Amino acid sequence: MTLEKTFILIKPDGVKRGLIGSIIQRYERAGLRLCAVKLVSCTREQAEEHYAEHRGKSFFSSLVALLTSGPSLAIAAEGAHAIAVVRKLNGDTEPQSAAPGTIRGDFAHMGYTRSAELKGTINNMVHASDSAESALRELSLWFDDSDYTDPYETVLKEFI
Ligand code: IDP
Ligand code: MG
């Protein structure tokens, strides 16, 4: 299926820096439709569940600490190849090596060495699902059916 829904999270570092508008603009201008959006102050359990695949890694506790340090903006976005498109717009995990023009490349510059020095996680502002399976899992972890809006008129077919 080319038409996909994906899960995006503007993490607390992006929200605290006042970048919600600048970041959402990039998804919308690429032709993605936002189906559900909400500010969430997540619990430790939800943060651990969200990042379950990273349990046991050295940066896991600082990642959970980041996610519970303030509100995040949860987004369900839809479009053709939405999962890959959002990963492309977000850019490389490490902002220092993320390409200019991507969200992580334009709004942050932190590298792995710097994050190790600070004994924290990489502050890269956004999360996005990396596969159809993770999109389904993450969307159901963050949203209820009642959070979704009715589809509105879109120009998706012509622009993406
Ligand atoms: P992704 O967000 O690009 O999918 P993942 O490998 O799934 O990257 O890692 C999840 C998050 O964990 C990253 O976005 C980043 O915030 C953090 N992270 C990943 N690798 C490291 C690391 O080596 N040191 C510190 N933080 C890391
Ligand atoms: Mg990931």
Image (spheres, grey):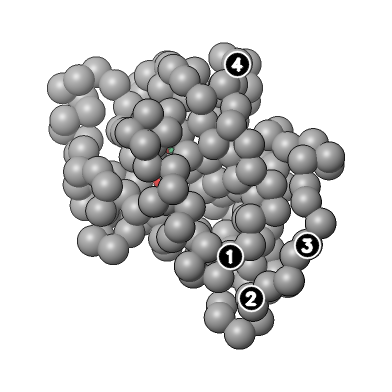
Element on which disc 3 rests: loop
How much space separates mark 3 and mark 2, taking CA atoms?
A: 12 Å
Figure check: 120 above or below 88? above
Element on which disc 2 rests: helix
For disc 1, the marked residue is 32
For disc 2, the marked residue is 156
For disc 4, the marked residue is 43
Q: How crowded is mark 2: few (under 14 residues within 10 Å), some or many (20 or more)?
A: some
| Residues marked 3 and 4 touching at CB (< 8 Å) | no
Is residue 3 toward the left or the right of residue 54 in the image?
right
How much space separates mark 4 and mark 1, taking CA atoms?
A: 28 Å
Mark 1, ligand 1, within 8 Å: the answer is no
For disc 3, the marked residue is 151
Residue type marked 3: Pro
Quarter of the picture holding the N terminus = bottom right
Element on which disc 4 rests: loop
Rendered image quadrant of residue 15: top left
